[in-house]
Amino acid sequence: MKRLSTIMVLIVAALHGWFLVVEMFLYEHPIGLKVFSHTPEHAAETAMFAANQGLYNGFLVAGLLWGLVRAKRDFVIFFLLCVITAGIFAGVVVDTSILYIQAAPAVLALALTLLGARSKSGSA
């Protein structure tokens, strides 16, 4: 269970790493325009907001990886809860697809992390 949990947390971190790249570096590029369905004009006007959002995604990646590397389950849980909260908020106010792209993988990673902790403590 621990291995599956780690894989899922790495997937969530990779997703947020991709979000960082798109929001900070590709926002006005055709890739970013397609991902966000923006016109070049709108992207130019809002690029600084997207870059800021990308930076926050980077913090989520750093926190998740730090938790995995330091074997600090509480850090992983905290940052997964941050991802879930952000995904639910964006899913409600921006686009419901974000619930599936961002929040759902984090919910699965959180469930696996909690189950892995339970099975570990149950086998001791």
Image: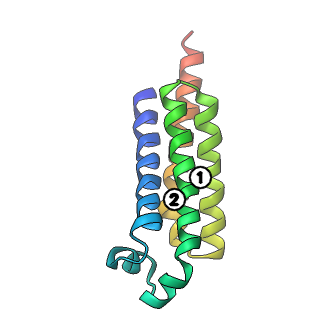
Residue at mark 1: 83
Secondary structure state at the residue bearing disc 1: helix
On the question of residue 39 being in view, the answer is: no
Q: Earlier in the sequence, mark 2 or mark 1?
A: 1
Left or right placement of residue 47 versus residue 8 in this view: right
> Disc 2 residue type?
Gln
Residue count near mark 1 (Cα–Cα under 10 Å), binned few <14, some 14–19, many ≥20: many
- Considering depth in this image, is 108 or 15 the residue closer to the camera? 15
Q: At which x and y percent is residue 102?
A: 51, 59
Where residue 21 sits, quadrant-wise, is bottom left
Image quadrant holding the C terminus, namely top right
Q: At which x and y percent is residue 58?
A: 52, 51
Q: At which x and y percent is residue 41?
A: 47, 90
Above or below — where is 66 with respect to 95? above
Image quadrant holding the N terminus, namely top left
Q: Are marks 2 and 1 in contact (CB under 8 Å)?
A: yes
Left or right placement of residue 52 versus residue 32 in this view: right
Residue at mark 2: 102
Image point 47% across, 64% down: which residue? 24
* Count of picture labels: 2
Where residue 74 sits, quadrant-wise, is top right
Residue lying farthest to the top in this orientation: 124
Image point 40% across, 29% down: which residue? 3
Left or right placement of residue 43 versus residue 83 in this view: left
> Disc 1 residue type?
Val
Residue count near mark 2 (Cα–Cα under 10 Å), binned few <14, some 14–19, many ≥20: many
Above or below — where is 81 with respect to 96? above
Above or below — where is 28 with respect to 67? below
- Considering depth in this image, is 9 or 20 the residue closer to the camera? 20
